[in-house]
Amino acid sequence: MRWENLALETDHSRADTGLFGADAVVTRTFDTPEFAGITFHEIRARSIVNRVPGASRMPFEWTVNPYRGCSHACVYCFARKTHSYLDLDTGLGFDSQIVVKVNAPELLRRQLASRRWQGDHIAMGTNVDCYQRAEGRYRLMPGILAALRDHANPYSILTKGTLILRDLDLLKQSAEVTDVGVSVSVGFVDRELWRTVEPGTPAPERRLDVVRTLTEHGLGCGVLMAPVIPFLGDQPAQLRATVRAIAAAGATSVTPLVLHLRPGAREWFMAWLGREHPHLVRRYERLYADGAYAPKWYQRRITRQVHELAEEYGIGPARPEMPRRIREPLPAEPEPGPTQLTLL
């Protein structure tokens, strides 16, 4: 897969069909603090609804990803490898070279209206975050959510972004006509760990505020406790503090997921580990000697601990495809003002 394949119209008669050909992409930078050092590549995509490979472990078949690359800059992000498909760097390039599918809302609306589309569940935020910083400027999600609402198409969103609250009304409207699932990713509440491994994300407590707000408005929200990072975020006291905070936020479920290190992410994470925690490098090499995933015994141990804590605090694990919908209309409320993405 290369850049020109993502364009609606590419002049294949030209000898130079490089990744950044003028017919395929518009490249922009913005002179604002929140976008310092970030380059946006605006493209017009051919399609926006993507089928998940059959070998995937994901419990869904279709996804929508309006962005590639992610300014959250999580050092462990498994999606880093996808940047290499476009001949883009999977390290700093993944964090700062953001591909924006500017026609995503109109394209989705057209695909949902197709006779071939069967109205299957669509998952968002499963590759890179659809509510990352760029969404504050490009505003692709309101059009996407409106299209899904208008076609009563079930969907789910996974995010670390507080910007999802901007679209609260659209989420509520969707939940009145179809199944809507919302999950927030919070792997730990340790602020020192957060600052080093997820430097571009809102703080964990701000994400838990999202859980609290969605729940207060009748949208049950689960938490994907991911990733649990071996030797840095997996101590019993750390797990307890995280589950306790998740329960206090009113989460409907908590599902732990141990760090996995796929190619692309593994190299970047291990380089970071060598700089920040060199004493752990050998332990990681042993723990992940058999591939991208930690051993089953380790995963089971973390899952058991988190589930026991969740039961203690009155919440439980999520079941596959566990959407939430509003069952009764809520009292009228004043229309909320603009929501600003908050990092701290």
Image (spheres, rainbow, N blue to C red):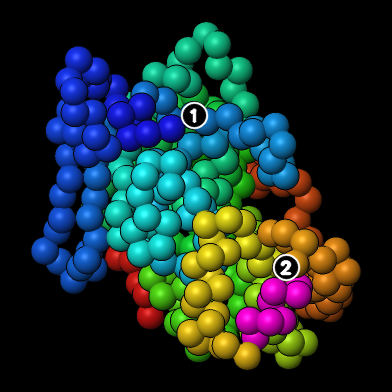
Query: Could you tell me the amino acid type at mark 1?
Result: Val
**Camera-side residue of 298 and 344:** 298
Q: Is residue 281 magenta?
A: yes
Magenta-colored span: 280-287
Dot placed on the residue nearer the N-terminal end, 1 or 2: 1
Drawn side of residue 195 relative to residue 38, left or right: right
Quick check: marks 1 and 2 in contact, CB under 8 Å? no
**Camera-side residue of 173 and 128:** 128
x and y, in percent, of residue 55 in the image: 72, 36
Q: Which of the 4 image quadrants contains residue 107?
A: top left
Q: Which of the 4 image quadrants contains residue 223?
A: bottom right
Q: Which residue is mark 1?
A: 49
Q: Is residue 188 magenta?
A: no
Query: Could you tell me the amino acid type at mark 2?
Result: Tyr
**Camera-side residue of 181 and 4:** 4
x and y, in percent, of residue 185 in the image: 57, 64
Crowding at label 1, few (<14), some or many (≥20) Cα neighbours within 10 Å? some
Task: Tell me the tag on residue 337.
Answer: none
Drawn side of residue 198 relative to residue 28, left or right: right
Task: Tell me the tag on residue 288.
Answer: 2
Quarter of the image with the N terminus is top left
Q: Main secondary structure of the magenta part?
A: helix
Name of the residue lying farthest toward the top = 115
x and y, in percent, of residue 327 in the image: 65, 44
Quarter of the image with the C terminus is bottom left
What residue sits 37% from the left and 45% below the top?
87
